[in-house]
Amino acid sequence: MNWLDVFCHPLWAVSTTLLALVVRLQRRGRWDPRTCNVQLKGKTAIVTGANTGIGKFIAMDFARRGARVILACRSEARGTAALTEIREKTGNADVHLRLVDVSSMDSVREFARRILDEEKALHILVNNAAISGFPRQITKDGFEISFATNHLGPFLLTNLLLDLMKRSAPARIVTLSSVNHYRGEVDFSHFKGDNLVHHMDTVYNHTKLHNIICTNELAHRLQGTGVTANSVHPGVVMTEVMRNYSIIVRGIFNFIGIFFFKSSEEGAVSPIYCAVAEETEGITGKYFDSDCSLVLPAPLARDAALAVKDFEVCERLTSKL
Ligand SMILES: NC(=O)c1ccc[n+]([C@@H]2O[C@H](COP(=O)([O-])OP(=O)(O)OC[C@H]3O[C@@H](n4cnc5c(N)ncnc54)[C@H](OP(=O)(O)O)[C@@H]3O)[C@@H](O)[C@H]2O)c1
């Protein structure tokens, strides 16, 4: 008998279906946004990368709760499509599009300037926009593009909006990291593209580790201000996140994903939990798993001395731009 015959056996189909069912049931978090009655009327929220994937569903939830929502997107066309959809589905007209390319420090500064000019308050900031599997490229600021998009841009944006958030307290900062941070490493030469191996998600993993390290240090610095900062893993989610990978890798991801991965709406649950739930009020400097539970991040993400250094390096890199 050929070992491949096992895949033709009816038991194979039955056990795969059962496994897929179990995984599907398990991927429902322990918290359901639909049963959470928190209203956000009078609150303002910004979601970066809100035109698709997880970010769109986070913004949709905030809009349903009555918030003034700012979709921070880089493409006017994609952003406008999401804006129209969110306004139509939620009936909330107080949803707005503001353009920003988070990989460009000039663009982040321009965006933040506009927000500070136009908004009286900011209660929720969700750093969601990110890229994965992007080939090596150095931005005009001299940063490796994945580091600029996933970490340095959001880092600068958060810092530029901090005073407004402190004045609006209680306020929450939620940064989408990933379970992949466990495979990340810290080497400050990475920021400028040195000593990096561009293979699959290697660079992405480093950036997601920096997300947690700097969010923890930010939380430490924000003690007593009423502004909290947490990181969250949304789960493995069927979005456009694999768009920069080869067609084969995307094909495998999408095929397995049909059975086992979360939808974008399901992926938005743990970030929404961090951003709005009463249960997470006052919690800061923590890392949430995709089922909304608090878990310990990787040891490097818990190293307080490293966090101070990382934060200072990022401040230095972004402050002069
Ligand atoms: N999907 C997963 O399995 C997974 C797992 C763990 C963590 N996450 C995290 O979840 C977050 C959302 O990911 P996703 O899966 O929803 O990804 P996605 O579908 O690829 O969406 C990413 C969003 O970020 C935007 N974006 C990318 N580069 C940008 C830039 N330079 N400036 C402004 N916006 C930019 C994209 O805009 P365009 O449409 O214009 O490109 C898009 O709106 C990310 O932080 C990711 O690391 C995802």
Image (cartoon, helix red, strand yellow):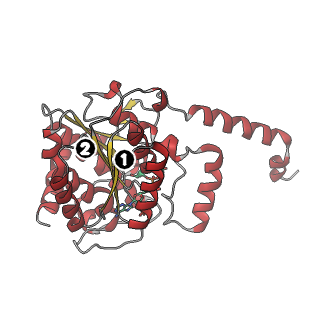
- Asked if disc 1 and disc 2 are in contact, CB closer than 8 Å, the reply is yes
Residue 11, relative to residue 69: is it above or below?
above
Residue 183, relative to residue 169: is it above or below?
below
Q: Nearer the viewer, residue 41 or 29?
A: 41
Residue 78, relative to residue 33: is it above or below?
below
Disc 1 designates what residue?
177
Q: Nearer the viewer, residue 71 or 243?
A: 71
- Residue at 20%, 32% in the rendered image: 170
- Residue at 55%, 35% in the rendered image: 27
Q: Amino acid at mark 1?
A: Ser
| Crowd around label 1: few <14 · some 14–19 · many ≥20 (10 Å) | many
Q: Earlier in the sequence, mark 1 or mark 2?
A: 1
- Residue at 65%, 54% in the rendered image: 255
Q: Which mark is residue 215?
A: 2
On screen, residue 170 versus residue 300, left or right, reads: left
On screen, residue 122 versus residue 149, left or right, reads: left
